[in-house]
Amino acid sequence: MAAHFDRRLRKAAVTTTVAAVAVAALSASQAPNVTADAHGRQTTADKVPTADTPSEESATGNSPYYTDLPPLDSPSPAPTIGTPASRGPSEAGIPATVLDAYKKAESALRQAKPGCHLPWQLLAAIGKVESGQAGGGRVTADGTTLSRIIGPQLDGNGFALIKDTDNGVHDGNSSYDNAVGPMQFIPSTWAWAGRDGNADGKEDPNNIYDAALSAAHYLCRNGWDLSVQADLNRAILSYNNSQDYLHTVLSWLEHYRKGTHEIPDGTGTLPVGRSDDDTDPGGSSPTPGGTGAATGPQAPGATTPSPGPSPEKPDKPTPPDESEPPGTGSPGPDPTAPTDPTDPETPPETETPTDTVHHLENAGTTGLTAIAGDTFDKKISTRAETQAGKAVGKVRIRFTVLGDTDATFTGGDKFAAVTTNASGVAVAPALVAGEKTGAFTVRATVVGRTVAGLDYEATVTERVADVLARTDDTALTCTPGGEFADQVEVKATHKGAAADKVAVTATLIKSVLDPTENDEGPYFKDADGTAVRTLTGLRTDAKGLLKLPKLYADKAAGTFVLRLTTAGGATLNVQLKVAEAEPEPSPSPSGDASPDASPSPSAEPSTDPDA
């Protein structure tokens, strides 16, 4: 045992040292003084995994992972061999379909969450340590693994204790959860994080396109910006809460950033070392109490491991060594630990907090209303209770946005999973209203237990403006049958600030006192050139500005009124004048007296008889 323990210390030291170099390189690659604070975002403690963060809050349940490190030199098609104590076989590239899935996921996130700055190389790094790139790329043309990749059951025997949450649908285990697929999601996380990455109408954790897109969204939740080192670390630790896991993923991330190449499916390099590997250097069988490689992510061609309890469990598990990541070590036997005389093969059944939840209660959330595009002022709070009404802490609550709405939680997701606090309360992330107005529902459910869901009604209202004003005071005039030289431009504001995307209706009315649409006078033209006197669907731009289409006049002369209205009560009346142009003065004939000259006074009759 002493030799075995010394080997593990040496292996951990080498791994940590090499990975530290990669971490330093990544940190150095960031722009100077770029921190989370520099982006003006809060980095609250509840977004940072801690030593006591429940395993079920990670993507994988803190399941075992592959510990192989990349070769020391830059990626190259030519094989290179690293230091045997710290390096497995050199990286031989990424299988074509797997690489395509990573790049498509990056492209999708660039559109959905551009502020996350997710690199496909991060997905490749996680895919490498979770499943060896889907077992060396053993996938079908549509990206589904040829055989299921299933981690050990999380029964508390050397791993986290997570009882079944999917009735065995994904992992084939109706007693406990197992991590599933090329990105090793546990079913309870897949239930809200799963995405359809290959547009086949279903979300399958065994499909690399679905799994890669789901991992991308998972890593980009909480408003994290992965170009910031602190946020990158948080995201990786939320996937598997282990510092060694963080260092290993960062090492592969740096490796893939230097370059890689595509190889045929099914020809990838297979990982060797695993975080729960307790075999000695000579390759003997696992130490008593260890799990062995057969229960972890399967090697290509391996059959699906039985999800039931291992047939050889003579000793009860002891708590993991504090020097190891939680949920990942495989402790040896404790000679002082008592055994179960009734059934030594079955770990003791421990009632989890989830088992005690009887119902959910509204924890005081009322009045969920927001203007389109705004964030709801109130957050949804749900309390988990026992049948007697006592609070239940450490229970995962899934919040789901339902209905015909584009509202989402902060970060763009329609799903969120939050763990209840000591008071039994889970507070969902802030809701952000989309552009679709109307009512929708947010449903709270208990992950891993069939309990009636709790629905919250929310409403999105039209964007509003309380003031409309013209941007200039130019008189708007036209001659009958002509067109107005100037177009009407207005600015909408709400409480003094520019009101963007506000719907505006423009109507040519009969008079200020009669808002009926006029049947003569100025008009707009539709796409076919037909006269129209009411326009709807107009919206202000990002600065609250709106320029109306050109106005025309029929033969009617007079003073007319254009009325503009918005949701929120803003109204503006614009005066339009249609009149014949005043005639120009005619020029005087050549040689004639000026028309302005006064005629000579007539000579009065002469009284002189000789005149």
Image (spheres, rainbow, N blue to C red):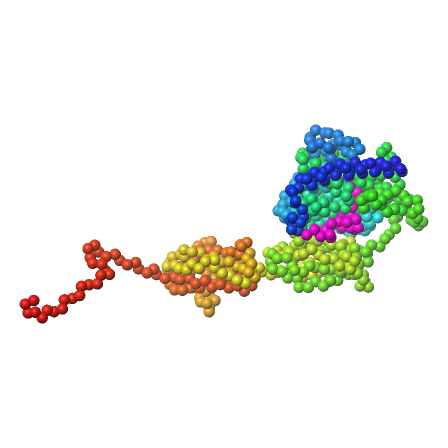
**Visible residue check, residue 148:** no
Q: How many marks?
A: 0
User: Which residue is found at the position 45% from the left and 62% from the top?
Assistant: 574
Say which quarter of the image contains residue 422.
Answer: bottom right
The residue segment tinted magenta is 42-65
Say which quarter of the image contains residue 86.
Answer: top right
- In the displayed structure, does residue 518 sit left or right of residue 141? left
Q: 181 or 432, which is in the foreground?
A: 432
Query: x%, y% of residue 83?
Result: 77, 31
**Visible residue check, residue 78:** yes
- In the displayed structure, does residue 528 sit left or right of residue 391? left
User: Which residue is found at the position 82% from the left and 36% from the top?
Assistant: 10
User: Which residue is found at the position 80% from the left and 56% from the top?
Assistant: 354
Q: 611 or 274, which is in the foreground?
A: 611
Q: Is residue 114 magenta?
A: no
Q: Is residue 45 magenta?
A: yes
Q: Which residue is most to the left? A: 610
Q: Which residue is most to the front? A: 33
Q: Quadrant of the N terminus?
A: top right
